Image (cartoon, helix red, strand yellow):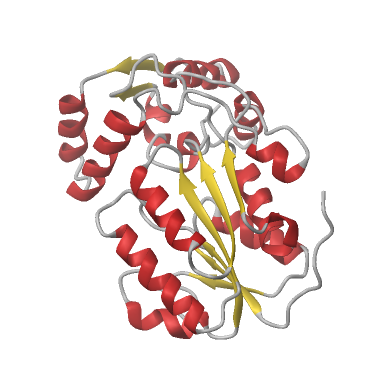
Amino acid sequence: MSEAIEQPAKQTLVLGGNGKTGSRVLQRLSERGWPVRIGSRSGEPRFDWEDTATWKTALTDIEAVYISFQPDLAVPGAVETIRSFVETAVKTGVRKLVLLSGRGEPEAEECERVVMDSGTDWTILRASWFSQNFSESYLLEPVLAGYVALPVGAIGEPFIDVEDIADVAAAALTEETHNGQLYELTGPRLLTFEEAVNEIAAETGRPIHYEAISMADYASTLAAYGVPGEFVALLKYLFIEVLDGRNASVADGVERALGRKPADFADYVRRTAATGVWGK
């Protein structure tokens, strides 16, 4: 583990500061006494990916930026948006960019290249599927209902704990030795979605059934619940293309960055079950 660099006079901007990774990155930087600014539509100054007029003000007096793009770097137009943002950041004097990216997404890799070619110090965090999607995102409601139906079968995924992502991001933002590094961040073992759901069921003592269904049935169900079409299209892409087995391997990014093993999915399940979020 390398030593932190001297604290900068300028701030670090954390985009997605209210999200799963951004909120945790903010917490870690604040605990270190690091000068931070939250980047969100409710922040001050306000930052909105869809309103470029907010970018320059949010970037004023910023030394480094944690970039978490919503909803995903794979959505149409994301590459152009990231390119415009990076150009604005460079013009306002930003010296370091840390990008949260996704494994197995060609569009995300284009965004990575934009950051790498920016002329700034950079670190890429190429993450696998978040464990916290089962407790802080769209999979929470099905888990609580006791029935999780997804269009994915026996494909292994090395679920990553976002606590580990936040630890790596905080290190990259505060330590020089992570400059120019691309870290593939995964958990230590592969699980199918059914196996992941079964581990949650076993820990909570609740019956939770998993069923692999067709993409057509899944899309119809989402539409019936009023899920926006663009989000349905994103999930189609992730489940059909990204979850095709291309990411069925573990990587050593967490260990390379932090000098320790990543948290296992079972660790996440025990910790999360203890909060009561999945019920008793």
Q: 51 or 257: which is nearer to us?
A: 257
Residue 180 image point, x, y percent:
62, 56
Residue 230 image point, x, y percent:
21, 49
Task: Report the side of 19 relative to 71 (left or right).
Answer: right
Task: Report the side of 89 relative to 179 (left or right).
Answer: left
Q: Quadrant of residue 215?
A: top left
Residue 189 image point, x, y percent:
59, 21
Tell me, yes or no, if residue 11 can be seen here: yes
Q: 7 or 193: which is nearer to us?
A: 7
- Quadrant showing the C terminus: top right
Tell me, yes or no, if residue 48 can be seen here: no
Question: Residue, x 71% and y 45% (percent of image)?
Answer: 257
Question: Residue, x 57% and y 27% (percent of image)?
Answer: 250
Q: Is residue 41 above or below residue 155?
A: below
Residue 111 image point, x, y percent:
40, 56
Q: 175 or 222: which is nearer to us?
A: 175
Task: Report the side of 94 relative to 1 (left or right).
Answer: left
Question: Residue, x 32% and y 16% (percent of image)?
Answer: 211
Q: Is residue 208 above or below residue 96?
A: above
